[in-house]
Image (cartoon, grey):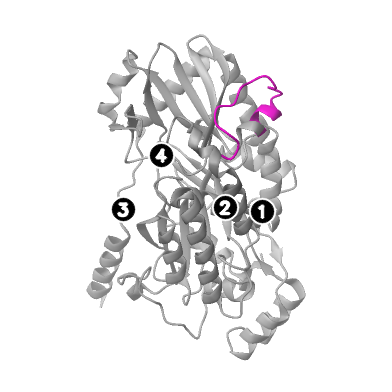
Amino acid sequence: MATVLQTANDSLAKLTEHSWKPQPAPARVVHQLLNECLQQSPFGAALSQRMLAETGTRLLDWIDHFGIPHVDPMLGELPGVGYVETKSDGGEAVWHHPEGLFPRIRVIDGKRRELAIKVESVADFLFAHEMTDVAIEGEPWSALRRARVASDAGVDVIVVERHGTLAFEPSAADSLITALVALHYERFLLRRRDFEQDAEGFAAAGELADAAMKDLGRDRACELFFKAERQYWQQRNRAGRIQLARQAVLGLGWANHDHHTYRSSRETFVLLIAFLEKLGFVCRERFYAGREAGWGAQVIEHPVTGVTIFADVDLSPEELAQDFSHEPLPARAQLGTVGLWCALHGEAFLQAGMHHLECQFDFSATRDQLKEAGIDTMPPFTDFPYLRQAFTRGEQWKVRPERVERLRAAGRITDAQANQFLSQGALGSHLEILQRDDGYKGFNQTGINEIISATDPRRSLHQ
């Protein structure tokens, strides 16, 4: 029996293995490049200090790209640390690192370096810093906008606003779609989320996505959809609203998002993945927390917008071996942590909104600063040298009586649990605080089950 169990465990490990590893060598090069830029740029150095003190974030995590002149000796170090040279749409040389989360490096003319910082809105950044005389390149709502906000000794600091593009230069043609961008964002933001059957909700969202893709292209439609999703989530999450307000003081927005987490019932999981693939997402590694956990996930990433999804679902070890993202999962009599959350609050894709948004921070600084703002965090569930993670204390949401009674009648919850949910509600959503180092792109495969178990609605009120 022990041999059979070990063989099964080995098979599960193989199904969930992935290649993401810390990348200290390119991390050192990126840190060196950033430090040299900040040594030459008083504006950049002051902004870095304000980011840490006022938002709990690191400038490192806001870098869109570096610009390096052809003659810069730093270019010679890139191949040796795993950077790969490609060509941009404009034919210029661009270096990227396929094995880690590192900024792209653009080869530019001249002798000055560029430090490009990503923000959600260039105009908001300029307003926050009282830069009323700085010109913005790119029309409002266009796919790419940028502005040079400082020119110091050898370094230009640029803020960049992206909407579904990897380009470096704004396009004049983008100005023609401004009204369509506003229209489709409004439709995504106001989309109907309550339906008699959840499948109808996925179909309706698919129609909205099809219309947006027809007018704007797949990548821009994807970017707009998740902008609306973050807006819906933060309306139901106080920690998110407070942290966004802190980041808005510096005109940054949510450009430091790392991944968006959706909880799904077993019945709708393939519909969720199908919708994401419609928008251009590509499945990455599978995730499984262990035999005792009873849930798994599909990590799925968009190659242009950089949006990454962690899609959770109740799952057995045997089902991990199948293509559970594309082969329907049958309903179960008993609900695990993820299934019960969906049954109480609705699908994360529909009524409930995301379970959590995770952004990149200085782990300790953000937790301390949020505590001062009245937001507590749960104990860290990952504390590696290259990855640190913790949830804020969850929002307690009211639960619709009809949902509780449906679960009680089906024997999926006890009378005591039903009364508890009706009187006190159930855990809803979180903000996740994460710090990545050495370009580590993966997730904690072994330690996350404890935190997911701690967010089970049946346990939350006893903590």
Q: Is label 1 in contact with label 4 (beta carbons under 8 Å)?
A: no
Asked if the residue under mark 2 is in contact with the one under mark 4, i.e. CB atoms within 8 Å, the reply is no
Q: Nearer the viewer, mark 1 or mark 4?
A: 1
Which residue is tagged 3?
18
Q: Which residue is mark 4?
A: 101
Q: Residue 58's image quarter?
A: top right
Give the camera-side residue of 384 and 257.
257
**Distance of mark 3 from mark 1, alpha carbons?**
32 Å
Look at the image and give the residue range highlighted in magenta.
Answer: 124-142
Of mark 4 and mark 2, the one earlier in the sequence is 4
Q: Nearer the viewer, mark 3 or mark 1?
A: 1
Residue at 64% x, 86% y: name it: 406
Above or below — where is 451 with respect to 361? below
Residue 379 visible to the viewer: no
State the residue position of label 2. Answer: 357
The residues tagged by marks 2 and 1 sit, at their Cα atoms, a distance apart of 9 Å
Determine the residue positioned at 51% across, 73% down: 265
| Residue 141 x/y as whole percent | 58, 40
**Distance from the alpha carbon under mark 3 to that under mark 4:** 15 Å
Residue 250 location (% of width, % of height): 67, 31
Residue appearing at x 57%, y 52% in the figure? 357
Q: Mark 4 and mark 2: span between their CA atoms?
A: 18 Å
| Tag 2: amino acid | Leu
Query: At numbered mark 3, what does the secondary structure look like: helix, strand or loop?
Result: loop
Crowding near the residue tagged with mark 4, few <14, some 14–19, many ≥20 C-alpha atoms within 10 Å: many
**C-alpha distance separating marks 2 and 3:** 23 Å
Q: Main secondary structure of the magenta part?
A: loop
The residue under label 4 is which amino acid type?
Leu
Q: Are marks 3 and 4 in contact (CB under 8 Å)?
A: no
Q: Which of disc 3 and disc 2 is earlier in sequence?
A: 3
Q: Residues within 10 Å of mark 1 (few under 14, many from 20)?
A: many
What amino acid type is highlighted by mark number 1? Gln
